[in-house]
Image: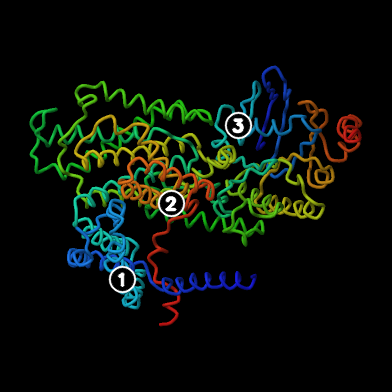
Amino acid sequence: MTLLRVDNMTHYFGGLRAVHNYSLVLEPGHIVGLIGPNGAGKTTIFNLISGIHTPSRGNIELDGNNLIGHHPHEIAAMGLGRTFQNLLLWRHMTVLEHVKMACYSQLEYGIWGAFFGSRKCHREEQRITAKAMHLLETFDVDRFSNQLAVSLPYGAQRRVEMARAMATNPKVLFLDEPTAGMTPDELNRMIAIIRKIHADFEVAIFLIEHRLKFVMELCERIQTLVFGEVIAEGTPEQIKNNPQVIEAYLGKEDIH
Amino acid sequence: MHSLEHKARQDKKGIRARLQAFAGPIPLIGWLFGLLGAALAEYFLGDIISYYLGLPKIPVLFGFLTVLKKPLLIPGTIGYLILVYVLPVLIIVKSLQKPANRLAGFLDKRPVTIAALVHLGLFYGALHLWADMSDYRLLVLKLTMIAIMLTLSINVINGYMGEFSCSHPGFMALGAYTASTITLLLFADDKQFGDALLSQALGPYFFPLALIAGGIAAALGALVIAIPSFRTRGDYLAIISLAFLFIVKSLIENLEFVGGPRGMSSQPHYSTLPMVFSVMVLCIWIINNFVRSTMGKALNAVRDNELAAEAMTVNTRKTKIITFMFGAFWAGVAGGLFAHVLRYVNPGSFGIQRLAEILAMVYFGGLNSVTGSIVGAVSINILGEALRPLEIYKWIIIPLLLILVMLYRPTGLIAFTEFKPKELMKPRKNMVEED
């Protein structure tokens, strides 16, 4: 059964057509990559699927549920976890608080429980603290748990953001340029981490990436996006040898 | 030259270390015993001591008023402060250090509620004795406690949630008028509503319900603001809430059945010190529970990055609306208490002036911090009273102080801290190791 299905999604920002007839089929446990030059509309596609924008046309289904018209927090609670290109961490919150926060929709106490510090509230807080600590260990950032997340080294901040995304219990994980600004060493480490979450959490992954090495190594299938349209889709081998991709994507790199 | 400076710095450090060594091993309960001792000392010996020091009467507010009116009395006032407050506190905390630590250790093993009640009981005892000495003190103390509630409740909105709300005096007015209308209608013979409808003996028991009704009225007012202004992010809330403040004020001025611009008076005397104190403690406790839970931390997430909060399953719109109503509720409750402390309300007391006062307290004390709110409310309030003899200059000194705080600590004196009552009441470590 298909986990995430996008059919003919089109989106206009005013008169600008940002995405045109985009379709995606993501099976459980697969890793799919989305590549394309700057401004091709990759992040817009992420934002459309995760509910930040509502597409002008088209249909999105996650695990059989229609996502159109739902708020981002509802879509996230349905099982779509994501990270952001430019690390949207919370300035005044510690690492542990970040991960606990992502358990918000799983909290079983209500607002009155929070006001009066009910027993259930304490129990739930303990439960999500344990869960968060476990995730922090998985991502090797547990030693920072009581520090402000923004004070960590860059690589560690990336891992905190991924731990936070995993705390929402996602079925699909969206990674928006997980290696942006990373050194080759950190890059290799990130590949290992993504492999690990893929294996441990049995989650399907959909990622945007600039570095071809990274995509080629991780993804089973790759889509190439240019000016909001998919010009090629296939295995890494097929994409690497597709003349259109070379022209649109790699060719553009040469001009820089 | 350098070595001299170095030495001076070392001495300074020495003083700090010595202070640390003195105060470090004393648990909170020890200090409370000290305060109680000082209050007792003043209660029984205050008159005699002030007589022998040549003071006309006991200094009511730590001698500020006396000193500012008659500078010649400075030595006597300082002597009084040392004899009545400083010495008893120091002697008691030091001599009771061991038993106080043992008591704190004993309470630490009991449920937090019991420990908190014992601490609060001691603190209330000291305050009660202190306030018993003069009506003026009692009034200042009650108004300070109400200010703490106001500051804390606006901190939830302006600090924890990072929005800028200007309508707190409006919420206060809604609470004050709702609670006053209920108590005047039901329990008082007055010219506004005529004879009491219920037996006056029931009044004090119904007063909490009247306060809650006031809070609910304020929360409903907040809902009216929240629905249009939380659709998007930005300065809308500041503008809409300011407009709300003016609307509430002119609405009350034009409503004849609540007295119009003349206001309402002769509310029954329900805001007693224990009443105000317990409501304040309840307010601090509930707000502190909320902001420390993950549900309350969602406010910080919304403030720091709303997009990320949404993506992490936080229902940001609901969070914002509920929090805004929650803050307004406590402002309404505080307003109800306020009306019954002064036993008179008029629309004039809920204007821009009051807003400036509340904002000053919250930004002075510190955003995103329960301790900061308490410190801000107490210091600005006491300072405002203490500098009263300076008349117009008071409004130069207090704003100057605010500017200084903003320059050196832009988020306030004690910002971004967590208030942990359990840690606060613990026995002090180095003492336990000795045993």
Across and down, in percent, residue B370 comes to 42, 51
Mark 1 → mark 3, Cα distance in angstroms: 65 Å
Of residues B373 and A218, the one nearer the viewer is B373
Neighbours of disc 2 within 10 Å: few (<14), some (14-19), many (20+): many
Label annotation for residue A51: 3
Neighbours of disc 1 within 10 Å: few (<14), some (14-19), many (20+): some
Across and down, in percent, residue B384 comes to 34, 46
Of residues B163 and B151, the one nearer the viewer is B151
State the residue position of label 2. Answer: B372
Mark 3 → mark 2, Cα distance in angstroms: 38 Å
N-terminal of the pair, mark 2 or mark 1, is 1
Give the vertical position of B56 relative to B224 (above or below).
Answer: below
Q: Secondary structure at mark 2?
A: helix
Q: Quadrant of residue B127?
A: bottom left
Q: Quadrant of residue B75?
A: bottom left
Q: Quadrant of residue A58?
A: top right
Residue type indicated by callout 3: Gly
Q: Secondary structure at mark 3?
A: loop
Q: Are marks 1 and 3 on the same chain?
A: no
Q: Secondary structure at mark 1?
A: helix
Residue type indicated by callout 1: Leu
